[in-house]
Image (tube, rainbow, N blue to C red):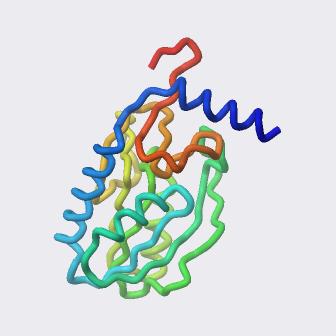
């Protein structure tokens, strides 16, 4: 079974289209770190990483933020290794109290916006003074979303993308670049 899964994983990557190379990813994260520093450096924020997709972005971003912050995480998902969203599943809330604090939520992608809107609403209900959203990728869906990100590293097309935290069937979160799946006919 592991050999079959390995073959399938390699085939997905071989058939994918490169959307943003690793150099563009690194440059975008550095730019966003500068924007966040300019806005939040004097607030001593709580950086909340949305598990699991937000880990690469949050980890890289934190090393570029040269101001005091607290770190915690939350785990809420709609995908569960599927390629389309379902009902929200809250798995872990932050351990640090957000009451009266500035919070920076860091996630991999703003797709439909349902998950991040629910996260923002919950944090505000818990008494956060301000909630900012930083996403690595904003999917260009051409429709209104229930939440906007305050900080966006890159825009991606309205296709299934993976890499740098975003997975495809539970794999390839570890890629330093962003790829998109091609449809079965090899078209975009």
Q: Residue at x 46, y 58 (%)?
A: 56
Residue 42 located left or right of residue 26: left
| Residue 3 or residue 128, whichever sits in front | 3
Q: If the image is split into quadrants, where does the N terminus sit?
A: top right
Q: Residue furthest left?
A: 38
Q: Residue reaching furthest top?
A: 185
- At a point 48% along the width and 45% down the height, the residue shown is 175
Residue farthest front in this picture: 3
User: Is the C terminus in the top left, top right, bottom left or bottom right quadrant?
Assistant: top left
In the visual, does 132 lie left or right of 49? left
Looking at the picture, tell me which residue is in the foreground, 171 or 74.
171
When the figure is inspected, residue 105 is found, relative to residue 170, above or below; the finding is below
Residue at 47 percent of width and 15 percent of height: 187
Outermost residue toward the right? 1
Q: Nearer the viewer, residue 117 or 74?
A: 74
State which quadrant residue 64 falls in.
bottom left
Q: Going by the image, does 121 lie left or right of 156?
A: right
> Can you tell which quarter of the image residue 19 is in?
top left
Q: How many marks?
A: 0
Residue at the spot 52% in from the left edge and 50% down from the top edge: 174
Of residues 54 and 174, the one nearer the viewer is 174
């Amino acid at each position: 079974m592991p050999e079959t899964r390995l073959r399938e994983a390699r085939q997905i990557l071989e058939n994918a289209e490169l959307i943003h190379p690793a150099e563009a990813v690194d440059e975008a994260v550095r730019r966003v770190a500068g924007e966040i520093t300019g806005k939040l450096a004097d607030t001593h924020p709580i950086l909340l990483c949305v598990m699991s997709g937000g880990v690469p972005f949050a980890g890289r971003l934190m090393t570029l933020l040269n101001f005091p912050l607290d770190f915690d995480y939350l785990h809420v998902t709609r995908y569960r290794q599927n390629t389309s969203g379902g009902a929200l599943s809250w798995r872990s809330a932050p351990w640090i109290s957000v009451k009266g604090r500035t919070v920076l939520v860091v996630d991999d992608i703003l797709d439909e916006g349902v998950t991040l809107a629910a996260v923002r609403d919950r944090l505000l209900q818990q008494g956060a003074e301000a909630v900012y959203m930083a996403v690595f990728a904003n999917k260009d869906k051409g429709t209104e979303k229930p939440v906007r990100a305050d900080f966006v590293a890159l825009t991606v097309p309205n296709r299934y993308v993976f890499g740098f935290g975003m997975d495809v069937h539970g794999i390839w979160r570890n890629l330093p670049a962003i790829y998109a799946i091609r449809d079965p006919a090899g078209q975009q």
